[in-house]
Image: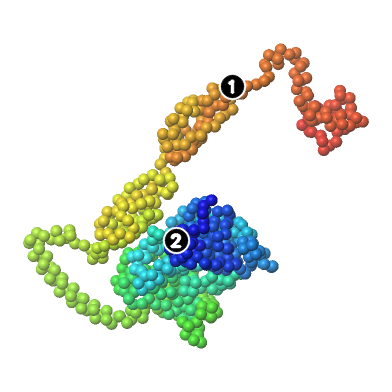
Amino acid sequence: MEDLSRLCFSCMERKDAVGVCPNCGENPTIVQETPFLPLGGILAERYYIGEKKRRNSEGYTYIAYDIQEGRRCSVREFFPEELAVREADGFSVNVTAGSANAFADGIADFRELWETLERLRGLSSLITVYDNFDENGTAYAVYAEPELYTLRDYLLEQHGGYIPWEEARILFMPVLSTLGTLHASGIVHKGIDPSAFLMTGDGRLKLSGFSITQARICYGDLEADVSDGYAPLEIYTKMSEIGAWTDIYSFTAVLYRALIGATPIASPVRAENDQMMIPAKFAERLPAHVISSIINGMQIFPDDRTRNAEQLRVNLSASPGTVGDTANIFRLPGDLEPEPPRAAPVVTPARGAGDRSPEEAVRSARQTYREYYNEDYDDYDADGPSQRRAARGSQNLQDMLGPTAEELQEEQDKKAKTRKALILTGSILLALLLLFLIGKGVVNKIRGNREDATTAIDTYTVPNFVGMTYDSVMSDTFLPTFFKFVKVEEYNASVPAGQIMNQSVAFGTSANRDTEVVLYVSAGPQTVMLPDVKDKTYEEAAAMLTPLGLTVAQATKYNDGTQKAGVVVETTPAAGTTVNMGDTVTIVVWGAVAETTTAAPVTTSAPATTAPITTQPIITIPTYTMPIVTDPITAPPATEAPTEAPTEAPAPEQDPDVAGNDA
């Protein structure tokens, strides 16, 4: 068995000697007390348990080592502390009195959640769940990624605590595709925050931190695991249903945190008095469609919010621009002028709204919610929001950006007049210059070398394309305009068709515009049409199939003596079928002729009356005659057996098939 004594319990990397881990700096004397699993414990005869990394009311997540695979992993244990206790052996889980039903419901939800995640493990932005099992009176799930480095950790390391949109777009956009698939499969995360995203070694995000619903909502059976600032209002109160829009709020709140460098105001506090704003320095540099997408995704009330991941993806993929470049960003569709919006009622707090905890704010937020919606329900119709609702959403957007625009408006007006004068003067000078250059014959050269000012980026860090699809890269609004992509397709049975396997320029390299990047894209498994090998010997058939990259196996078919033994009858799959290289093809051949111990001349030379004599004992002696002779009183003469046996023999022992044949 592999020596596990040198593994660090904190990071599961090997140490050369006893002492502080050189990889993570953890002290080897760490202790893991109950109710957590003991350090060095083994589950399913396979998983070597390390330090606890996550804890909530549903259970615990441990870093572990998969002995069978020889790699680090994470193990999630269902252990609701409110419903169960750990036994003295350090492993067994015992349900507390009166909690049996709640525990049974919770563990059933846990199994369903993680089994669904295991079926979806091919998603590029999802943790790779690969095992589920029951042990110690509870349930466990295993996924490949260790819980060591999260998006929260990454953002805290950045200067100012934020990243530019160009980097955030590459990090976050692939997650939306995964999020949409999760929602279509019936999974709503309900707990997305910066710690729920694991950062992989190649710079990608993977969504983690899944829990059952009862551990996520403030009105469930378990203590709620809520991340204030990222949880929407429906997590705190039952006033609205939970759905895809719940994760949309949390996702855009995380995007806000990544771009602004600050945690958003908690939604119950915003419901009382929404004072969340985008600082001017960020509003000036962020594209207008990004700001609009965040605002729409973080609407306080669910009915006003972006409804699903695909809609958010489309909004974030809009043509780049800035707020200042988009004069009509708040205009309604069809240029309708909304009626003056009525602000949501505000419950005046005893102290500043910003001083209130979400728990205190949620009580008055519920009343705010009722007043806000009940008064306006008549304005809703089946086709969508009314003008009043649209105006309300527009007002929310103005509230976040309005103060900044008002402060800058006067200065912008002055600059606009100056720009007009400069543009007029510049146009005249440009016209004169063009007339001069035309005479020199160089206008075409200037036009050919002119570069669009909106794309005047000279260098760009090469993203990690591995794991992305080629189509998603080419549909990006920026990447194909900066790089020259060359697509090279290669057959690969283990990578889905269309997914990028490798790239010619390494991730993280600073590249110039028009740098050629070769993307090696999987064409899926190579296929071949199965030839017809019928009537050939097994050896001949195998010699034809193995050069095609196929594995062969042999099977035999019963031969009654009319077929030649060893000759191919058929193949499975059948000839003409398209199969993948590496697949196994079963070659079915006729078996050897079976030898018989009954000589034919004996049967044909015997008198005709001997036929029933030879067959009669086979039918009557084992099944019919023996029960009769055990009862000497009722046994009839042998000649009367066909008529007397059905009435005299005990019913449970009678064989209806024998009785019918004799009759």
Q: How many marks?
A: 2
Q: Nearer the viewer, residue 425 or 232?
A: 232
Residue lying farthest left?
A: 439
**Residue at 49%, 59% in the rendered image:** 7
Circle 1 sits on which residue? 561
Residue 603, compared with residue 174, is above or below; it is: above
Q: Is residue 79 left or right of residue 644?
A: left
What residue is rendered at 17% in x and 58% in y? 448
Type of amino acid at the residue the image marks with label 1: Gly
Query: Which residue matches tag 2?
Result: 206
Image quadrant of residue 103? bottom right
Which of disc 1 and disc 2 is earlier in sequence? 2
Q: Amino acid at mark 2?
A: Lys
Left/right placement of residue 392 relative to residue 450 reads right
The answer to whether residue 130 of the structure is visible from this angle is: no
Q: Secondary structure at mark 2?
A: strand
Q: Position of residue 190 (x, y in %)?
A: 51, 66
Are circles 2 and 1 on residues that touch, CB within 8 Å? no
Question: Residue furthest toward the bottom?
Answer: 350
Q: Position of residue 222 (x, y in %)?
A: 59, 69
Residue 2, given in percent of the width and then of the height, sits at 51, 52
Work out whether residue 13 or residue 375 is closer to the camera in this orientation and state it: 13
Q: Residue at x 40, y 67 (%)?
A: 154
Compared with 246, 462 (above or below) is above
Q: Residue 283 or 509: which is nearer the viewer?
A: 509
Would you call the spot at circle 2 few (<14 residues within 10 Å), some (14-19), or many (20 or more)? Answer: many
User: Camera-side residue: 457 or 196?
Assistant: 196
Position of the C terminus, as image quadrant, is: top right
Could you say which disc has been placed on residue 219 in the image? none
- Helix, strand or loop at label 1? It is loop
Q: Where on the picture, by quarter, is residue 438?
A: bottom left
Above/below status of 306 relative to 507? below
